[in-house]
Image (cartoon, rainbow, N blue to C red):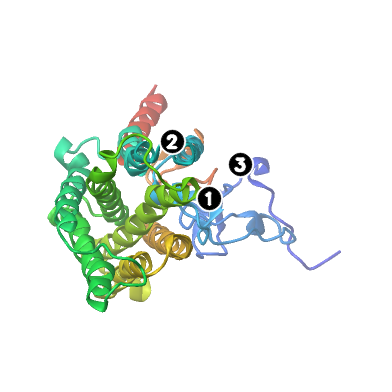
């Protein structure tokens, strides 16, 4: 005999006559249905079912429960609304794209590799927005507005930049050239990337932190792709196989194709998320991100990332600059990921459970709240149109 309470049965063994079919979540303290995950905070309920169960690692990413919220994961951070199956396909597509770009550069087709690298991430962004159909009830100009603005601004910035006297050897760079190329240009480009998304802040229908992050990231990657293409026009006129160092060409195109778009998308997306959190989220949620959730401080952080990248490219040789860019890209991803994660968690406050829906990610029935009780994915991170269609289909099946 022991005084310890008996462990609750796992979800699949809870008898159908158990009343009420609720359990207290150790993480958020709310009474929630007896499922595998808390539908309010997304925490695994294994500890609640068994006193001796090993506590599962907390800190999972709300948009991808199989990943840590602190992981440097490009696909699930830049494209958080992808269902789990599509995330795998996008990882393969990104890996194949990088391999093709690097292969072309290694073979000496640097201009072709440069073009392919410039369009790789923007193309994935377009496919992402089209596949998940995030804003199916919105006009086309809203869906593609951020991408179109970023591309147009990138072309204008690229043309203007070609007229500036920035070319010089690393050792011969003057202070004014470094300030212009490493500080002035990144700040102006960052402002242009952010201007388009902020124009959508006045539209109250887009009231989620995810909206701001998506608009910001889409604008940033399209800006970067268009900017690189304009800057590369002189190289494109030099023939298919100009005289270049193949290894240096590989490093350069990989940096242009992945690292620089990721830095821009992470910085601009996180800053936009801070604006949405401050001006569109409920008052009680506006301090969820701490200091980086304050728009003014987020602007300083985003500017610091872009300036650090600009200075590294201006004063360092190719390989050291690329290493610095890789570190900055990781920091940008972590920042954006934190904004997305905490923004999703804050939306789980005291939402009443009115019906059950079929989870678009795992296909199982779950109460309609913030997280799926079966697979733990954030239902708020999934496309709004997909959630609405699923809820309607579930209601029809229940009525029939």
Disc 1 crowd rating (10 Å Cα; few below 14, some 14-19, many 20+) is many
Locate residue 48, reporting x and y percent: 63, 58
| SS state under label 1 | strand
Disc 2 crowd rating (10 Å Cα; few below 14, some 14-19, many 20+) is many
Quadrant containing the C terminus in the rendered view: top left
Residue wearing tag 1: 65
The reply to whether discs 2 and 1 touch (Cβ–Cβ < 8 Å) is no
Q: Residue furthest right?
A: 1
User: Left or right: 4 with respect to 201?
Assistant: right
| SS state under label 3 | loop
User: Left or right: 153 with respect to 10?
Assistant: left
Q: Quadrant of residue 43?
A: bottom right
Locate residue 372, reporting x and y percent: 48, 45
Residue wearing tag 3: 17
Point out the frontmost of discs 3 and 2. Answer: 2
What residue do we see at 32% from left, 42% from top? 122
Label 2 and label 1: CA atoms lie apart by 14 Å
Residue 117, visible in the rendered structure: yes
Depth order, front residue of 162/157: 162
User: Left or right: 238 with respect to 255?
Assistant: left
Locate residue 147, reporting x and y percent: 22, 44
Q: Quadrant of residue 128?
A: top left
Which one is earlier in the sequence, the residue at label 3 or at label 2? 3
Residue 359, visible in the rendered structure: no
Depth order, front residue of 23/110: 110
User: Left or right: 352 with respect to 212?
Assistant: right
Depth order, front residue of 142/224: 224
Mark linked to residue 360: 2
Depth order, front residue of 225/299: 225
| SS state under label 2 | loop
């Amino acid at each position: 005999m022991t005084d310890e309470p008996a462990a609750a049965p796992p979800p699949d063994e809870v008898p159908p006559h158990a009343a009420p079919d609720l359990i207290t979540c150790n993480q958020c303290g709310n009474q929630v249905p007896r499922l595998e995950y808390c539908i309010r905070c997304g925490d695994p309920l294994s500890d609640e079912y068994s006193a001796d169960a090993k506590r599962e690692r907390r800190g999972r990413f709300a948009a991808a429960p199989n990943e840590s919220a602190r992981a440097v994961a490009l696909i699930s951070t830049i494209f958080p609304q992808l269902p789990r199956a599509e995330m795998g396909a996008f990882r393969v597509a990104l890996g194949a794209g990088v391999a093709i770009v690097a292969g072309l550069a290694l073979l000496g087709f640097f201009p072709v590799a440069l073009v392919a690298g410039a369009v790789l991430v923007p193309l994935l962004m377009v496919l992402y927005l089209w596949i998940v159909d995030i804003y199916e009830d919105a006009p086309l100009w809203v869906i593609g507005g951020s991408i179109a603005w970023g591309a147009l601004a990138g072309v204008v910035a690229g043309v203007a930049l070609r007229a500036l006297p920035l070319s010089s050897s690393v050792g011969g760079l003057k202070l004014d050239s470094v300030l212009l190329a490493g500080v002035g240009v990144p700040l102006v480009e960052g402002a242009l990337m952010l201007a388009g998304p902020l124009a959508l802040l006045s539209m109250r229908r887009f009231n989620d932190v995810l909206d701001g992050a998506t608009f910001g990231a889409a604008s940033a990657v399209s800006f970067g792709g268009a900017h690189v293409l304009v800057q590369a026009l002189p190289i494109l006129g030099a023939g298919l196989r100009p005289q270049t160092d193949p290894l240096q060409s590989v490093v350069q195109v990989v940096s242009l194709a992945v690292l620089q778009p990721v830095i821009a998308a992470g910085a601009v997306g996180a800053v936009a998320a801070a604006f949405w959190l401050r001006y569109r989220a409920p008052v009680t949620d506006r301090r969820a991100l701490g200091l980086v959730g304050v728009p003014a401080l987020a602007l300083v952080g985003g500017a610091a990332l872009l300036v650090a990248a600009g200075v590294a490219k201006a004063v360092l040789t190719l390989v050291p600059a690329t290493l610095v860019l890789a570190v900055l890209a990781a920091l940008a991803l972590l920042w954006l990921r934190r904004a997305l994660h905490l923004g999703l968690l804050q939306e789980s406050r005291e939402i009443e459970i009115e019906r059950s829906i079929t989870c678009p990610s795992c296909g199982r029935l779950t109460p309609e709240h913030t997280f799926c009780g079966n697979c733990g994915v954030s239902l708020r991170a999934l496309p709004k149109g997909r959630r609405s269609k699923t809820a309607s289909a579930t209601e029809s099946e229940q009525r029939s």
